[in-house]
Every structure is written in structure tokens, then in C-alpha cells.
Image (spheres, rainbow, N blue to C red):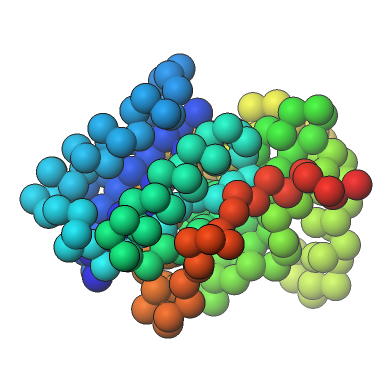
């Protein structure tokens, strides 16, 4: 399956093309520039690098957040328009899940964190290893409340739990995590903090293969914070 995956929910815009299990091309750029001006050129470039045309895609996957409200809207609107025009299936993927996917083979609890501002983080909890799975919904909380929830979820485990944290939220809240969890907290190298288009495409492919697709008209950004309180 040829799948186009994009994410514009953070300042790091990423577009990737996969074919089956193979990464064909990827464009990832971390610069201060509006996604609106660089997304379509990036999509066009990735398709050209892969020597395919958009009409030969089997589907598209897009990061739906949480993250930058404006960035998410640009990405979702662009891919919805593209898929509608080409009559291609579309899948929305959590940006937090895409970040956690970078560490999916680690035998630990994986906690992707994004800085939500207002003294809050966007976060989620996953279990890595051969049985990679999601343990929580995407949430928006102060870091202390997130760590409280993490502790409650893992308190019943009979073996010591290690935690792998990943995401740009560590730049602001890493010290608070260290204070609470000490040596049990491991921080991923910054290169893994990126919500890559390749991860979005791979997660989208998994759903497309089972027929679990989204509707053009009802797919919306996942802002998380809206209506939370």
C-alpha cells in the first residue's frame, strides 16, 4: 500500500510516503515558517521523489493533534481536500501516538509529552514492547496531575516500572518529571521527539488494512483542551 502521511501539529512539519513496510521518501523541517506556505510544496516534493502521482496513492493519514490549533487545521484541511478530490480513503492519527510510536519496541511505559502552554502538557500513556498498546486517552493536564495519573495506573504492577518520556514537553517539564520519578524516568534522545510523517503513515496503514477509515466530512482536529473543563 502506498500511503502518504503528514503532521503539522507542531513546528516540525513532516510529510512521508511509504510503500508497504518501506519508507520511500520523507520531508521533515523544523524552521520558523508557516505550514500553510510549505505543506503543499513538501507533499509535491515527496511524491516526486517517490516517482508516483497522487492518484496512485492507496490512502492518506494525517496527524489530528493535539498540538498547535492552527497547524492542525492546516494539515487536516489539506489532506481532507486532497483525499476528497482524488476519492482516496483518509485516516486521522493522534500526534501523541505518532511520537510514542518512535519508541514502540522499548519494554517500558512510554509517555509522549507536548507543551500545551498555560502550565499544562498534552500527554498520553502507552505500553511498549511486542504488545505495543495504548493505555490512556490523549489528555491535557498540569504535569503534576499527569504524573499522579501515571502513578495510579502503574501502582498495581508487581515489577519495577520504567518510564520512557519523549516529546518537546520535556524541555519545560523534564525537571519536574525527574523530581517525581528519579532514576525510573528515561528521556529519549531529542531526535525521537519529532512526530514524523513516516510514523503517521505507518499507523494509518494499520487502520486502512482493516478498513477502519474516517469520513471526509466528520474528521476533525483533536484539540483535547476544548471542553475539557
Q: Residue furthest top?
A: 32
> In the image, residue 142 lies at what x, y percent?
84, 39
> In the image, residue 4 lies at what x, y percent?
31, 55
Q: How many marks?
A: 0
Relative to residue 48, is residue 209 depicted above or below? below
Residue 100 visible in the displayed image: no
Figure quadrant of residue 183: top right
> In the image, residue 86 lies at what x, y percent?
28, 59
* Residue found 70% across the figure and 55% down from its top: 138
> In the image, residue 175 lies at what x, y percent?
75, 30
Q: Which of 95 and 167 is in front in this view?
A: 95
* Residue found 18% across the figure and 47% down from its top: 47
Left or right: where 81 falls relative to 24: right
* Residue found 54% across the figure and 76% down from its top: 131
Q: Nearer the viewer, residue 79 or 163?
A: 79
Q: Residue furthest left?
A: 51
Left or right: where 132 falls relative to 183: left
Image quarter in which the N terminus is found: bottom left
* Residue found 34% across the figure and 51% down from its top: 82
Figure quadrant of residue 157: bottom right
Residue 2 visible in the displayed image: yes
Left or right: where 76 falls relative to 167: left
Amino acid at each position: 500500500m502506498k500511503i502518504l502521511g503528514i503532521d503539522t501539529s507542531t513546528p516540525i512539519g513532516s510529510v512521508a510516503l511509504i510503500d508497504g513496510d518501506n519508507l520511500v521518501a520523507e520531508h521533515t523541517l523544523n524552521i520558523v515558517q508557516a505550514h500553510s506556505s510549505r505543506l503543499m510544496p513538501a507533499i509535491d516534493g515527496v511524491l516526486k521523489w517517490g516517482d508516483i502521482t497522487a492518484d496512485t496513492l492507496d490512502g492518506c493519514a494525517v496527524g489530528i493533534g493535539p498540538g498547535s490549533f492552527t497547524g492542525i487545521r492546516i494539515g487536516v484541511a489539506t489532506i481532507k481536500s486532497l483525499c476528497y478530490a482524488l476519492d482516496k480513503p483518509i485516516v486521522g492519527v493522534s500526534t501523541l501516538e505518532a511520537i510514542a510510536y518512535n519508541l514502540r519496541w522499548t519494554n517500558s511505559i512510554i509517555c509522549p509529552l507536548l507543551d500545551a502552554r498555560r502550565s499544562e502538557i498534552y500527554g498520553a500513556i502507552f505500553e511498549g514492547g511486542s504488545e505495543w498498546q495504548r493505555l490512556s486517552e490523549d489528555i491535557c493536564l498540569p504535569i503534576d496531575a499527569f504524573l499522579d495519573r501515571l502513578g495510579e495506573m502503574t501502582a498495581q504492577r508487581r515489577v519495577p516500572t520504567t518510564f520512557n518520556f519523549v516529546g518537546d514537553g520535556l524541555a519545560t517539564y523534564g525537571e519536574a518529571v525527574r523530581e517525581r520519578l528519579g532514576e525510573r524516568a528515561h528521556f529519549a534522545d531529542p531526535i525521537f521527539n519529532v512526530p514524523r510523517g513516516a510514523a503517521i503513515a505507518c499507523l494509518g496503514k494499520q487502520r486502512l488494512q482493516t478498513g477502519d477509515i474516517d469520513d471526509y466530512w466528520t474528521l476533525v482536529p483533536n484539540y483535547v483542551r476544548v471542553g475539557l473543563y
